[in-house]
């Protein structure tokens, strides 16, 4: 649980049973999905950008990179939202993703 955003870790510590059920739901969806892991993470990244969640954007950026996405693919997954989400939301998400990319490259 250490690579997860702090609020998510705290949730897991405080509500362990709910956290485990939520994790199982995500695992089940992934198992029955026709999408590969990289594609799923890029889609989730776009959803995180739309929800304006910095920690989710950074988490799904890391996960997408771990699944084989390039930095350019990550950035373009976010840029696709510019006409729907607007310029400020997209630029904020792009900034958060670039921070996560830099962090990922340091490891």
Image: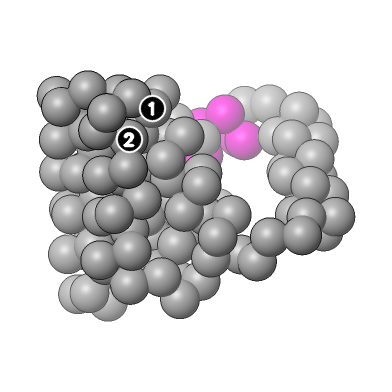
Q: CA distance from mark 1 to mark 2?
A: 8 Å
Query: Residue drawn at (47%, 34%), measured in percent from left and top?
Result: 47
1 or 2: tag closer to the N-terminus: 1
Front position in the image: 62 or 40: 40
Is the stretch drawn in magenta largely helix, strand or loop? Answer: helix
| Residue 31 among magenta residues | no
Query: Residue drawn at (22%, 23%), measured in percent from left and top?
Result: 86
Q: Is residue 58 visible?
A: no
The outermost residue toward the front is: 83
- In which quarter of the view is residue 84 placed? top left
Q: Residue 95, image x and y in percent?
A: 15, 43
Front position in the image: 58 or 2: 58
Q: Residue 60, image x and y in percent?
A: 44, 50
Q: Residue 39, image x and y in percent?
A: 55, 60
**Label 1 element class:** helix
Of marks 1 and 2, the one in the foreground? 2
Q: Are marks 1 and 2 in contact (CB under 8 Å)?
A: yes
Q: Which residue is mark 1?
A: 50
Judged left or right of residue 82, residue 45 is: right
Which region shows up in magenta?
Answer: 9-13
Q: Which mark is residue 81?
A: 2
Q: Which mark is residue 77?
A: none
Query: Residue drawn at (26%, 67%), measured in percent from left and top?
Result: 71
């Amino acid at each position: 649980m250490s690579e997860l955003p702090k609020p998510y870790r705290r949730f897991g510590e405080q509500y362990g049973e709910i956290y485990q059920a939520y994790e199982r739901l995500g695992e089940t969806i992934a198992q029955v999905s026709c999408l590969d892991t990289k594609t799923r993470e890029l889609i989730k990244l776009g959803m995180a950008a739309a929800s304006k969640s910095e920690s989710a954007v950074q988490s799904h950026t890391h996960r997408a990179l771990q699944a084989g996405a390039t930095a350019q693919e990550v950035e373009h997954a976010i840029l696709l939202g510019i006409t729907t989400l607007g310029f400020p939301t997209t630029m904020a998400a792009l900034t958060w993703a670039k921070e996560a990319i830099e962090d990922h490259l340091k490891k």
